[in-house]
Image: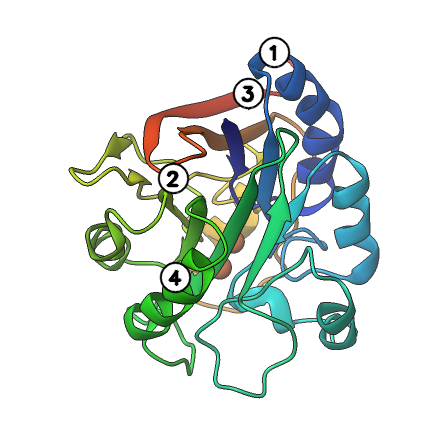
């Protein structure tokens, strides 16, 4: 079976890319499931019920997120009522929503999805992603051997460490949050597909999704700036993971970079 995982969708241009490209990618690659990280979908940071629903209407089957998930208050109640949207599992207990879920793919396979957030260079007050990750994987494995993990973290080391930690227990560990796609896709020795970062779905001529002039002004002056999301040169980034549905082992992982319009 084939699963497309899409990296951080940024703002309106990111949503446009998903709307236009996901149906094409589904047909071209005969995809069974589409999963996307939506933490930047509302104006560049955060997610609202409306923008999450839009993505689910554009052919995305399941949404993961990251530390920006809490930006809009209305997302708390929505997380409690929409099982296709999850937040990192290692937030302290009592946080709204769930950190893992199960979704049925087109071929009938039940796929477990787990979301974790890193603790290195990230201002989050969270529990250990490794211990919580292990606990959640054991719980999901009672339901299905096909499990995908979105490790939302800043440090490459923390993401790679998670790949090795869960190797052989899950189908794939893919990273999000840095918005820059890495070129280290591989199958680890015990059968887990790994990629340090999926990259961003949003404006390519930007600094991780924000206007270049505004980010430069911030670096040059040190003063607070408004950061806007450019609308042009939009790219969808992610990876396609091929999994044996019986064993949950990954057979291949291929990076995806798809332009909305030529540029
Ligand atoms: Fe992000
Ligand atoms: Fe993030």
Percent x, y of residue 216: 46, 49
- Residue annotated with mark 1: 28
Percent from the top left, x then y, of residue 218? 48, 59
Are the two marked residues, 2 and 4, in contact with CB atoms closer than 8 angstroms? no
The numbered mark, 4 or 1, whose residue comes first in the sequence reads: 1
* Foreground disc of the pair 2, 3: 2
The quadrant where residue 184 appears: top left
Which one is nearer the viewer's eye here, 219 or 240?
240
- Residue identifier under label 3: 258
Within 8 Å of ligand 1, the CB of disc 1? no
Residue located 52% across and 42% down the image: 212
Q: Quadrant of residue 131?
A: bottom left
Which residue in the protein does label 4 denote? 137
Where does residue 146 sit, x and y in percent of width and height?
Answer: 44, 44
Classed neighbour count for the residue bearing mark 2: other residues with Cα under 10 Å, few (<14), some (14–19), many (≥20): many
Tell which circle, 2 or 4, labels the residue nearer the N-terminal end.
4
Q: Residue furthest toward the left?
A: 189
- Whether residue 121 sits left or right of residue 165 in the image: it is right
- Residue 222 badge: none
């Amino acid at each position: 079976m084939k699963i497309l995982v899409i990296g951080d969708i940024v703002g309106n241009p990111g949503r446009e890319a998903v709307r236009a490209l996901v149906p094409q990618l589904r047909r071209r690659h005969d995809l069974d499931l589409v999963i996307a990280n939506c933490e930047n979908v509302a104006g560049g940071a955060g997610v609202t019920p409306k923008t999450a629903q839009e993505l689910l209407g554009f052919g995305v089957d399941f949404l993961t997120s990251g530390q920006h998930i809490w930006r809009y208050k209305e997302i708390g109640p929505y997380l409690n009522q929409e099982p296709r949207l999850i937040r990192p599992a290692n937030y302290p207990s009592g946080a709204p929503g769930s950190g893992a879920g199960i979704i049925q793919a087109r071929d009938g396979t039940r796929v477990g999805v787990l979301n974790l957030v890193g603790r290195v260079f990230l201002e989050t007050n969270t529990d250990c992603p490794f211990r919580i990750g292990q606990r959640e994987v054991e719980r999901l494995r009672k339901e299905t051997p096909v499990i995908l993990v979105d490790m939302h973290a800043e440090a490459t080391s923390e993401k790679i460490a998670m790949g090795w930690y869960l190797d052989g227990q899950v189908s794939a560990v893919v990273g999000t949050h840095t918005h820059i796609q890495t070129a280290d896709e591989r199958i680890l020795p015990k059968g887990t597909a790994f990629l340090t970062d999926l990259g961003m779905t949003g404006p390519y001529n930007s600094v991780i999704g924000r206007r270049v002039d505004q980010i430069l002004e911030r670096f040059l002056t040190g003063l607070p700036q408004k950061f806007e999301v450019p609308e042009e040169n939009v790219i969808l980034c992610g990876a396609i993971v091929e999994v044996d549905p019986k064993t949950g082992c990954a057979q291949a992982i291929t990076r995806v970079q798809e332009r909305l319009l030529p540029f």
